[in-house]
Image (cartoon, grey):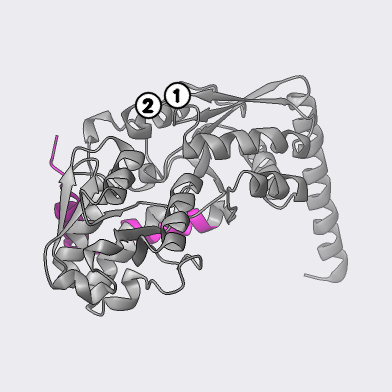
Amino acid sequence: MNTAKIMGALVLSAGLLAAGLASAEDFYRGKKISIVSSSAPGGGYDQYARLLSRHIGKHIPGEPTIIVQNMPGAEGIKAANFIYNLAAQDGTFIGALPRTLSLSKLYAHHEHMLQFDPFGFQWLGSLKRDTGVLIVNTKSGMARPEDLKTRDVTLSSQALNSPNSMYARMLNALYGAQLKPVEGYEGSTAGMLAVERFEVDGHVTGGTTAPIKNKIQSWMKAGQGRVVLQFGMHQDMDYPDAPLVMDLVTDPQAREIFELAFTEQEIGAPYVMGPKVPTERVQVLEKAFIETARDPDFLADAAHENAPIYLLDAPAIQALLKRAYATPPESIQKLRDLAGVKKD
């Protein structure tokens, strides 16, 4: 293509973008966009949804009003089904979903309830990624990952299919640990309190919210707690002496299974739009999402709330999903077995 044709193509592309933005400004002016949060008010996902709602409006042409609509239920499935099937497909609804929904079809847990395809969502991006930890009471005598192989180590857990128990089973099967989840605790607060009281040796988290981090730091400062191990693809440098599981496991299939399980942690706190929202409006909101995540005012607000921001864009999420769902069937089945997934 000669120079004149290249310049003509660039001018046409710029013109189409400008026209799209003008059209979006006309559409969104005076409108209301609902961010549908899959968690109850005050939850971790809700915190990030409300942070986003306070800042993204100024990055959207027409500066529409942004509200948060809470829709908890069925571990996020209720909100996901709503965004995919019932919400208006005009660009006025954004789903703030839990990370677990990204692998829901792969796990095939509660399969009869899933009325969406993860690849059908139009992803905007994510604002965080998670790394879980194994925190123990120092009275347990556990100091290093190798110690977890020497005797039974009791852990507080919510339920059979919660990360507290699932990661423990994975570590037992793929690393040789002797973790014994004690299930039935109502949430992470109760689970952490059990560690503090030394009812159990420790607790495995799926991630580290601000309250959990504050509790861990206070224990470590007082010499009452120690982070022994981290669960995820990236180390949380607040605990530099605690290695990642991935640093300890050498068997190729074991690493593949852990990487698959940790995909949802990389995806973190994702935001999506319905499958039929016009492409040009998705592109406008995707651009606004990225601009917001880099906005100094937004970042200062997040820092004030002790809510770390890590931007993952839509193409990166799609690449993670593609890789996860392409995992060999035998590794997927092994993960399902370790997760305690039973067919409906």
Instruction: Look at 85% across and 58% down and name the residue there.
Output: 8
Up-down relation of residue 131 to residue 282 (above or below): below
Left or right: 139 as drawn, with respect to 103:
left
What crowding class fits label 1: few (fewer than 14 Cα within 10 Å), some (14-19), or many (20 or more)?
A: many
Disc 1 target residue: 71
Left or right: 232 as drawn, with respect to 194:
right
Which range of residues does the magenta coloring cover?
316-344
Up-down relation of residue 144 to residue 297 (above or below): below
Residue type indicated by callout 2: Lys
The answer to if 262 sits in the magenta stretch is no
Residue type indicated by callout 1: Met
SS category of the residue bearing label 1:
loop
Q: Is residue 230 visible?
A: no
Q: Quadrant of residue 89?
A: top right
Disc 2 target residue: 78
Instruction: Look at 88% across and 65% down and name the residue there.
Output: 4
Instruction: Look at 13% across and 64% down and name the residue there.
Output: 178
Image coords of residue 195 (percent x, y): 28, 51
Structural distance between the alpha carbons of marks 2 and 1: 7 Å
Left or right: 52 as drawn, with respect to 164:
right
Instruction: Look at 77% across and 19% down and name the residue there.
Output: 30
Image coords of residue 153 (percent x, y): 17, 61
Up-down relation of residue 32 to residue 123 (above or below): above
What crowding class fits label 2: few (fewer than 14 Cα within 10 Å), some (14-19), or many (20 or more)?
A: some
SS category of the residue bearing label 2:
helix
